[in-house]
Amino acid sequence: MKQPLFILGCERSGTTLLASLLQCSSYGELVETHFITKYYKHLDNYGNLRDKNNLTKLLKDILKTRSVMQWKIRIDLDRFYEELEEFSYREIVHNLCMKMARKNGNRLWGDKTPHFTLDVDILYEIFPNSKYIFIVRDGRDVALSLLNEPWGEHNIFTCAERWNKYNRSNQILEQLNNQKQLFFLRYEDLLDNAEKILRDLYKFIDEEFHEKEMNKLIKGIRKGNYNKWKSTMSERQIKVFENTAADTLKRFGYETTYDETGINGFMKAAYHVHESIMKVNFLFRTNVIDGIKIRYFGKEPFAD
């Protein structure tokens, strides 16, 4: 049995597009599970998972995660416990995600949760033989997209910080690359040279490249749909972003005008205060207002 597949990368970097281009594989179109690293960090709260009550409590908590609620799968808790080959967190995650995969007609499962990029060491510890795809996109285009999302960043500096954090050099990623477990690509290259990159990618995941089906998907890709920041960003925004993340941009081959010199402490604090206020407002609407609507008024759960 193959291991799961993980797509890594900052939000709005093309992870969803990339996942859609894998729908012809045994993994199908990868989903965002959101819960894997979260509950791994809190396993001590559940005790020995060989104890049925402990395992059931963990599974119930996972099933209440909004992203998992979207799967709309029925789980018989007693049967789930009996079907486990080992009482490990890895086995619980794998069995649960396989139920989702089979419901969607797939033989394997994969994940594209962006924030797992920051916890790739945990993924590697749980699934040491898995394969990973890392996609990077010009951070200035990512920033423009994040600023338009209610859950995204709310100013150019925190956008730059976020993109920089997701794309800075990482020892685990370097190790995975050396072990032939990591496939790296740039979003812009995928748009302009999709067929070649996808052939290489399908070979990397040991999947057959079905030419007819893949050509239909490739036709929907908009070549050259990048560098929007050049005509949309103000000079001030470009300067703030590059003063914060120019070194990372250069490392991935993106052109820059300014060096990474940082911004002054007062402006940095002001940007952080602004971001905190906007984030509190969003989380209140998401976790309180929408939580009430989901629980009492039948609103569909969502994974944001």
Image (cartoon, helix red, strand yellow):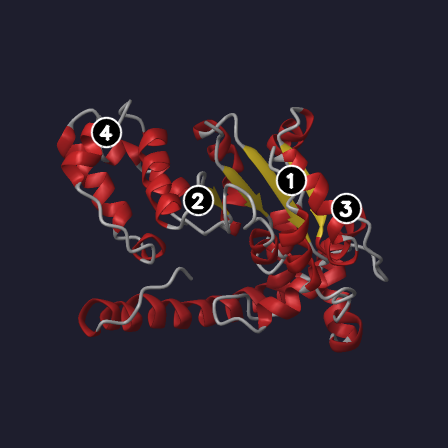
Say which of marks 4 and 2 sits in front.
Answer: 2
Mark 1 or mark 2, earlier in chain: 2
Residue located at (23% from left, 39% from top):
58
Res 197 visible? yes
143 displayed left or right of 296 = right
Which residue is at a point 45% across and 41% down the rendered structure image? 109
Gap in Å between the C-alphas at discs 1 and 2?
A: 16 Å
Quarter-of-image position of residue 295: bottom left
Residue pointed to by mark 2: 106
The residue that label 4 is drawn on is: 83
Q: Residue 44 carries which label?
A: none
Number of on-image labels = 4
Q: Residue furthest front?
A: 212
Earlier residue among tags 4 and 3: 4
Q: How far apart are marks 3 and 2 (CA)?
A: 25 Å
Which numbered disc covers residue 196? Answer: 3
Q: In this view, does 36 lie to the left or right of 141?
A: left
Q: Report the quarter where the N terminus lies.
A: top left
Determine the secondary structure under disc 4.
Answer: helix
